Image: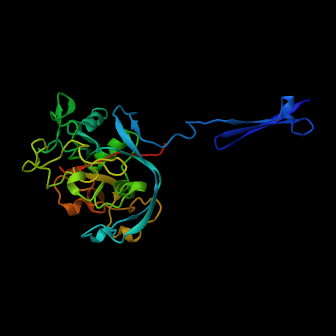
Amino acid sequence: MKLNSFTFLIGTVIVVFSFSAEGQTSNSDAGLGYWLVAVMSDKAHPAFEDYTEDSCGVNLEMVAVEGGQFEMGCTSEQFDCGVDEQPAHEVRVDDFYISRYEVTNAQFCSFLNSVDVGANASKNGKQFIALDQKLSQIQYVNGEFVPEAGRGNYPVVEVSWFGAAAFCKWAGGRLPTEAEWEYAARGGSKSEGFLYSGGNQLDEVAWHYGNSKRDNSSGFYENHGTMPVGLKQPNELGIYDMTGNVYEWCSDRYNRDYYGYSPVENPKGPESGYSRVLRGGSWGDEPKACRVAYRVSVGEYTNYFMYGFRFVKDRK
C-alpha cells in the first residue's frame, strides 16, 4: 500500500499523519498510523529568565522583567508630587531585560576603549563623558581610558545622554523608556507598592544625601558621593540601586504635561524636545527626589556628577 504523509506544527508539537493511497488513515497495528512527536525548541521559544549579556566583552547581569499593566505617576503612596507626575495613569509595557546594576566606571571604560573616540571622549561633536571635571572617575592615561584606583565598581557619572545611549547601542541594547524604568523600579509584576524601589525605608534601599557621607564614598561633596553598586537591598525583581546612588538616563524626551496624553501601550515619550528624562534620585538627594514617581529633565549634552544609567534589552 502506498502511503502519503504530511506534517504540521502546533506550538512545540509536530504532528505527522500517514495516509493510504485511497485516502484512508492507515492502521497503526500494521505499522502505519500517526505519531505525535514533541519537539521542544529552545531556539524557537527561549526561556524568559535572567542571564548575563556578554556579547560586547563586558558582563552585564540582566533581569527578565515580565511585562504588564500598572499605574504610573503620582499614586496613593507617593508624597509631595510634582505637576509633571500627574495625573496617575494606566500604562502597559512588554517584556524586557534590564541590567541588575547601574553601568560602572570599568564597564564604561571598556566601551570607550572599543570605539573611535578622542582623548576627550567625544565623537561627532558629542561628548560622551566629561573627563575634564574633577568629579569624573575616569581618566585618559597613556592612550587608554581607565577608572580611578578603587573606583571600577562605582556607577559611572558625568556621562551625557549621548554617552549613555552610545554605550547601550554598542552593547546591543538601548536605554529604558521612562515607563519601563518606573515599572521595573516599582517591582514589575511582583510590586508591593513601595514608596521607593524595594521598600519604604530609604536607608535600606538607597544611597542618598542622608547616608552617603562615608570614608569609602567617592567624596564628591563634603565626603558625600557614590558608593559601589549592589550594596543596598534590591527591589522585588532583584534590581539594585534604582533608588539613589545616581540618577539614570531614560530614552524619552521630556514634557511636563506628557502624562495627560500618554498612550497606554508602551509609551516612548514626546516626539520632540531638547531635554531628556532622568529617574531614581542620587547620592546627593533628599527623600522626595528618591521616590519611584519623581521626574527630572535636563539637556542631552549635560554631564553631571549625579547622572549615570543602566542598560535595557528587548526580549530575545
- Across and down, in percent, residue 56 comes to 37, 33
Query: Visible in this render: residue 58?
Result: yes
- The residue lying toward the viewer, choosing from 268 and 141, is 268
Residue 216: image quadrant is top left
Q: Position of residue 54 (x, y in %)?
A: 38, 33
Query: 203 and 216: which one is in front?
Result: 203
Question: The N terminus lies in which quarter of the figure?
Answer: top right
Vertical order, 256 against 100 (above or below): below
Quadrant in which residue 230 is drawn: top left
Q: Residue furthest left?
A: 222
Residue at coordinates 43% horizontally, 63% vertically from top-left?
Answer: 91
Point out residue 105 in the picture as x, y percentages from the top left corner.
23, 39
User: Viewer-proximal residue, 200 or 260?
Assistant: 200
Up/down of 41 relative to 78, above or below: above
Q: Residue at x 40, y 68 (%)?
A: 89
Direction from residue 274 to residue 132 in the image, left or right: left
For the point 35% across and 38% down, the residue is 60
Q: Specify whether residue 256 is in view.
A: no
Q: Position of residue 145 (x, y in %)?
A: 21, 33
Q: On the image, which quarter does residue 23 sit in?
A: top right
